Amino acid sequence: MIRFEGICKSFGGARAVNDVTLDVARGSLCALVGTSGSGKSTLLRLANRLLEADEGSIRFDGADVTNIPPVELRRRMGYVIQSVGLFPHWTVERNIATVPRLLGWPSARIDQRVAELLDLVGLPPGLHARRYPDELSGGQQQRVGVARALAGEPELLLMDEPFGAVDPPTRRGLQDSLMAIQKRTGTTILLVTHDVEEAIRLGGTLAVLDQGRLLQTGTPAQVLAQPATDAVARFFGGPLLGLNRLKALRVGDRAHAGAPSPGEGEPIDAEATLEAALARMVAEGRSRLPVRRLANGAPGVLDLADLVRP
Ligand SMILES: Nc1ncnc2c1ncn2[C@@H]1O[C@H](COP(=O)(O)OP(=O)(O)OP(=O)(O)O)[C@@H](O)[C@H]1O
């Protein structure tokens, strides 16, 4: 869907992005992660030509982005930033309708799209469509920002720290909504975050940047099991990397067949993370949990020892 090839970008002689080659497959979610100043936002802005690369090429659906007019490019790529940037004097529905209006959609189609998107991001249209941004909480504004970016049915959604400014429980709610939206719409997402937990939780592919260089790509489970460099290991927790790894693995990945014995407590879901399983074991003083259902449908068990298996 989008491929960065040998991309370099400098500001005043300092390399912000250094020879990055990265492929984001159609329908996937790729999280650009790395410490502050590693070049994540720059890479995102190069995708929609808010910035131009010094070297290398970016192909979007097979075409070099420099051959696509910026207006067309930004219509085909939704862009969500942390500060949201909603127009304060426009209602929620008018904000969301920005791109469809520019595209000249008939008003009935726009109204239908706005209502559908508000539902999708979990804001009932009857309650929210006519409100103004300053009548919404920060988390609700973020949801409107996501709806607005999706309005023109973009092929790619670029998100720069989209949930950076909201509290952790709201952030988790927004992450869940985003994952559900992606499942439903199949939109390709390239997202910037420096939050390790968010990067792991969203699943998909991680692309780890450090000082402008791409150090590693892979699923969270792969990257946390075998960090390519010390910088990657440090980013994912250093001495606590092992604990973060438990966030990237599911109970079903490690549980084994077995009949739970009486008194072993509530079964845990095979989809729960190993971190959640360990938390239950610690809280309940158990070294074994029954598992509701393995991939083959049979009940199973998870032992404390399963958590430390390679
Ligand atoms: N417009 C600009 N002019 C000059 N330098 C810039 C500009 N944009 C970015 N930089 C520099 O490029 C480097 C990479 O910045 P970038 O914003 O891409 O990093 P980041 O990984 O997104 O960081 P953060 O997580 O803090 O947002 C930094 O050293 C930054 O100071």
Image (cartoon, rainbow, N blue to C red):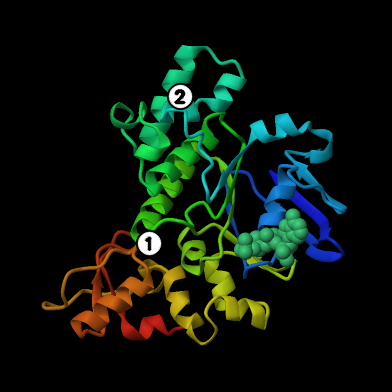
The amino acid on which the numbered mark 1 sits, given as a three-letter code, is: Pro
Which quadrant of the view contains residue 105?
Answer: top right
Which quadrant of the view contains residue 93?
Answer: top left
2 or 1: tag closer to the N-terminus: 2
Q: CA distance from mark 2 to mark 1?
A: 29 Å
Q: Is residue 310 visible?
A: no
| Residue 21 location (% of width, % of height) | 77, 58
The residue sitting at 40% across, 67% down in the picture is 250
Residue of label 1: 168
**Image mark count:** 2
Q: Is residue 287 visible?
A: yes
The amino acid on which the numbered mark 2 sits, given as a three-letter code, is: Arg
The residue sitting at 43% across, 32% down in the picture is 117
Report the front residue among 299 and 136.
136
The residue sitting at 73% across, 71% down in the picture is 211
- Give the crowd class for mark 1: few <14, some 14-19, many >=20 residues within 10 Å: few
Are discs 2 and 1 less than 8 Å apart at CB?
no
Decide if residue 230 is on the left or right side of residue 148. right
Residue of label 2: 113
Q: Is residue 34 above or below residue 281?
A: above
Decide if residue 278 is on the left or right side of residue 247. left
- The disc at residue 222 is none
Label 2: which secondary element: helix
Which quadrant of the view contains residue 201?
Answer: bottom left
- Give the crowd class for mark 2: few <14, some 14-19, many >=20 residues within 10 Å: many
Label 1: which secondary element: helix
The residue sitting at 66% across, 56% down in the picture is 41
| Residue 303 location (% of width, % of height) | 31, 82
| Residue 84 location (% of width, % of height) | 51, 44
| Ligand 1 rendered quadrant | bottom right
Report the front residue among 287 and 224.
224
Q: Is residue 233 above or below residue 100?
A: below
